[in-house]
Amino acid sequence: MWERARFASRWDPDEAPPHDDLLGGCVHASRLLGQDPALVLAGGGNSSVKTVEADVHGDDVDVLWVKGSGWDMGSIEPAGFAPLRLAPVARLAELESLSDATMANELKAASLDVASPAPSVESILHATLPHRFVMHTHADAVVALTNTPAGHELVREVYGDEVVIVPYVMPGFDLARRCAVQFPAEATDRTVGMVLSNHGLFTFGDDARTAYERHLELVARAAERLGDALAAAPTPEVEPVAPPSSHEQLVAIAELRRDLSGVAGHPMITSCCADAALRRFAARPDLQRVSQQGTATPDHVLRTKRLPMLGRDVGAYAAAYEAYVERNRARLGDRRLVPVDAAPRVVIDPELGVLTAGRRVGDARAAAEIYAHTVAVIEAAEALGGYRSISEGDLFDVEYWELEQAKLARQPTPAPLTGRVALVTGAASGIGRACAVELLRRGAAVVGVDLSEAVGMVSTEPAYMGAVGDVAEPDVLRAALSEAVRSFGGLDLLVVNAGVFPEPASVAALDAATWARTMRVNAEAAAVLLGLAHPFLARAPGGGAVVVVGSKNVPAPGKGAAAYSASKAALTQLARVAALEWGGDGIRVNVVHPDAVFDTGLWDDELIATRAAAYGLSPEDYRRRNVLGSEVTPEVVATLVADLFGPGFARTTGAQIPVDGGNDRVI
Ligand SMILES: [Zn+2]
């Protein structure tokens, strides 16, 4: 990874916009940089281009197009750049001080387009640099060089006088002001970039390609230096921590998630990192020292917190975090502190490896990606004399930065099941599929299980995983539960839905094998699943919940459906006993009894015609033969199932709820 060739230019003149399309060139260069995670992670980095535009009077105006916040460099478009009047923005750097709120106001006031996004917090810095194209990333290789005891000397050794080196200063106005003074004083004709210690790299040029290629060239030189250092002082070989697999380990993960969610105040997703480098890092004998220094670049503090938790004592971590906040809160002056929860976002355990946590699956994934890069930076910096981060106070300033806190305050209310983990059997079609989709829509992470491979295609969201297999095989159920625990941290919600509807047969003509298979899938497999799921449901933050999909055939069986009706009755009794036994564990178990849901894997047109004939009805009337005279769709059932996991049913267990349009044989 630390090789010069890894950072070869990917500029293709055939793909790049024409030379005179300045904004297009900036977009293109930004994307090339932003698509490389060794340069840009989780919305980090920014870029700009200076142009001349005509204002509403037709007069020429110098304009700074700067990356808008909330846009990712890797996928940015022209609309992701905010056009600002250059002169008033550059002049802000002359002020002695500027509050974040005033800066945001001034930048907005300088905008030529009120519909454009909020400009980057580094806009003033971009404005003061006397170059047309400016590119900024938090490149791992450059950060690794500077995050060492001799960082300044190393940067000088690698780049000579081609860069200006700026010591660590809080991003935003303070950094812009510092650069506005230092850059003109130190830049020469040979200057092609600026290294911000413990933060990242700026490069510039009169055309987009030059600014981009200088960026890669400087990163490549840093990578080469790191590669040499690691060749001379390799990372000590250790046996990586094995991915957690035993039942005890999976239960330990569920307990960790429960504790972590308790501290956070809401359910959190917890994901195991499969990455071998992370599992090796977790086994380092000097883990305590190398992991407890701080982040690689300041903005990572928002995703990973300042320090990972070592081991599983969440209470001790939270106490230490609160003490850190108390030690530093005076730095806020008279500004009110918006609290951030005290739960860790990265956990390193000698037995479980590295786990990351977040409110949503995407948050846990982002923390994992950042921490994988952090480990690479730490190990390279260790080969250069030791990894050093910025001070605790400096990181606190970024974690509790007014602008970041304002973003937190603006976050929309999360969907009601956010942070919860669900498992749905029979998820490839019909009611199961509709349940998986509805639970995802309400914010849950979902593992779907089904015999059909279509279960893998229910959703492309990262919060969804499909597992193919027969629910009548206990190993399939074990594997799906392991997936839920490893990927999302546990199990809160279980939808027992998979079932078979055998060929109609009268009691006098029952086939023993069909009877056995029906009982096995519809009842026995459910019993096995409940048993396997119990340890995880019992550790669900906020309590576990199960919904069993029964059938109207339980209260109102039909001729020719003996095996099916008996199996669903057995399933219902199973659920009722589970409700009795598990109340003390905080687990609710309820049953829904759908009727005549035809859009499922169980039904085809021929079967509908046969069943309709058995009742002396047309297929159309058969679909709507209920008190309300309306069809029961999988979506209707899924809405009820998801509602049963919500607050309205928080005191309901052991219930059987029909979702059948009203059945006159039951009412
Ligand atoms: Zn930056």
Image (spheres, rainbow, N blue to C red):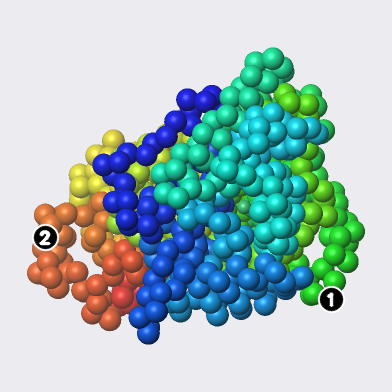
Residue 200 shows up from this direction? no
Q: Position of residue 467 (x, y in %)?
A: 41, 40
Residue at horizontal 39 percent and vertical 79 percent from the top: 59
The one nearer the camera, 145 or 656, is 145
Residue 334 has which mark?
1
Residue 215 shows up from this direction? yes
Which tag, 1 or 2, sits closer to the chain's start? 1
Question: Above or below — where is 358 with respect to 593?
Answer: above
Most distant residue in the bottom direction: 57
Q: Secondary structure at mark 1?
A: loop
Quadrant of image for the C terminus: bottom left
Residue at horizontal 90 percent and vertical 59 percent from the top: 327
Q: Position of residue 647 (x, y in %)?
A: 58, 72
Of badges 1 and 2, the one in the foreground is: 1
- In the image, is the residue at mark 1 within 8 Å of ligand 1 by its beta carbon? no
Residue 31 has which mark?
none
Quadrant of image for the N terminus: top right
Q: Is residue 17 left or right of residue 84?
A: left
Q: Is residue 657 left or right of residue 58?
A: right
Q: Quadrant of residue 271?
A: top right
Q: Position of residue 328 (x, y in %)?
A: 86, 60
Residue beneath disc 2:
609
Question: Above or below — where is 59 with respect to 593?
Answer: below
Q: Quadrant of residue 554?
A: bottom left
Q: Secondary structure at mark 2?
A: helix
Q: Is residue 660 left or right of residue 511?
A: right
